[in-house]
Image (cartoon, helix red, strand yellow):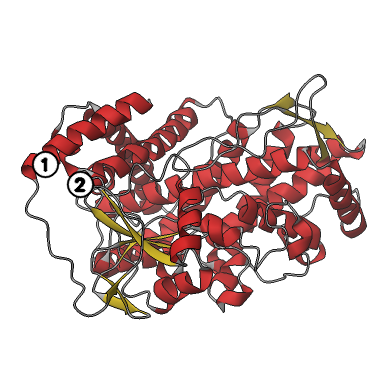
Amino acid sequence: MIPTILITLFIAFIGYYFSAPAKETDKLNNGKELPGPIGIPYFGNIFQIGLHQYISFSKWAQEYGPIFQIKLGVKRWVVVSDAAVAHELMVKRGTNYSARDHSFIMNEIVHPGSRGMLASSGEYWRKIRKLAHNGLAQKPVESYTPFIENESLELVRSLYNSALDPVIHFRLFTLNIILTTVYAKRFESPDDPTFLKLQSYIVDTIGFLGYDAIINLFPILRKLPLGLNKKARHLMANYFDLMKQFWDRFKEEHARGETKPCVASHVINHQDDDGLDDFDVHNMFIDVLGAGLDTTAITLSWMIALLANHPEMQARAHAELDAAIGRDRLPTLADQPNLPYIRAILRETLRYRPATGWLSIPHQSVQDDLYEGHLIPADTTVVANVYAMNMDPRRYAKPERFDPDRFLHVTESSAALANGPIGKRDHVTFGWGRRLCVGVHLAEAEGFLSLAQLLWCYRIEVEKGGVPPVVNEWQLGITMPPKPFRVKFAPRHEGVKEVIAK
């Protein structure tokens, strides 16, 4: 893999050398240049950052300060490693820092014509995000409570007294919640061919974004016969066709008055208000599915992996559940205020092992801007170093330790804290400002309920003769899932089977 990347970068260098225009003069007339490490011509700092970019960025932050710049290929990046600085730029000055850089795969293959929420900017993005937000805001999500509770029940049933890697069950749970809230549809089994096809499309699309990062830094690669473009276009054609089938079927049922309240029913009633056609809707739902499937499944996987390593935390959670809920019923979303330790486990997992990785999805500046006398030029990629912020020892005592107690007395949701003063924010995993995760309310609801019901039902144990899940390493990629593991979901008491069968 590494030799292939090096060969690819060498080809990019040759192409860039002979095709690049004369170097543009940096627009620094109105301010000082941000500090940063010295790179090499054309490649910039790309060979200095290594596989774990967040580590290099954190070290450079110690040397150059909480905001510095680097060059990666043809791109200028500004890396922010302090939450207060990120809040200033991406929240208070959000109008200027909510754009997205043009991405070859995202803008031309995944979302042709820069449609969809993740790839778009400007007025079009505001319209389509508003449409999605109106279906995924706090009040609509509260109305989806029966969907969420039903899918959580199906999840705990599917894991009864089993020993396995639970990730496929977590994906089914997450995808069913998204599909029931979006289309009022669900899959019955993780063996369903359409489910397997859809989750494969989503995971493969996320995988292509890793190649996209290199292509965006070295645009000459777009012209080379690497085979990736053809594979990506074939994947998206199949993915888009499947999403179109969902939408067309829903429209037919809606016309006959056979649909239940869901996001799609809201969208179909309001898409014409902002001039959005069916193609826009398909792109929006592709983003909702892609952003929601893997991230929530990864968070659930991390919670289970961590708890398997901490039976004392499980015992404490079990005691809380027995005291607040008893053993005659499952917990519900309405029980959240009475289960502070369960909520703290979820919150600490989001801080400690963010599903989306240690770097934020890049923002882009729209116009030149000055920050404390330093110029951030227009069209600069701005990245938040989530690792530096979520592991900041000034904000978290012993941040490298998994410790739910640090959030035991936090009662506000992560969504509410993300929109409040930066000093009160619990973590920065859900993003910033206008690009804050649009599904944050749904993610918190399904994360809490699934964890509460799993812990009400089961002890999470290492298999006999097995090894505990690895929690200090993870799979490398755009997202940050744990390494594959197996655990046993052992019923806590005799009443579990009867309660979940009701």
Task: Locate the N terminus by quadrant.
Answer: top left
Earlier residue among tags 1 and 2: 1
Q: How many marks?
A: 2
Image coordinates of residue 303 in percent, x first then y, are: 69, 45
Q: Tell me if residue 184 can be seen.
A: no
Tell me which residue sits at (20%, 47%) in the image: 42
Q: Do the numbered discs 1 and 2 sit on residues whose CB atoms are within 8 Å? A: yes
On the image, numbered disc 1 is attached to which residue? 17
Between the C-alphas of marks 1 and 2, the distance is 8 Å
Q: Which image quarter: residue 377?
A: bottom left
Q: Which image quarter: residue 197?
A: top left
Task: Locate the C terminus by quadrant.
Answer: top right
CA neighbours of label 2 inside 10 A, class few (<14), some (14 to 19), many (20+): some
The three-letter amino acid code for the residue at tag 2 is Tyr
Image coordinates of residue 252 in percent, x first then y, are: 35, 46
269 sits left or right of 318 in the view = left
Image coordinates of residue 406 in percent, x first then y, are: 75, 63
**Image height check: is 299 above or below 61?**
above
Q: Which image quarter: residue 138?
A: bottom right
The three-letter amino acid code for the residue at tag 1 is Tyr
The tag on residue 42 is: 2
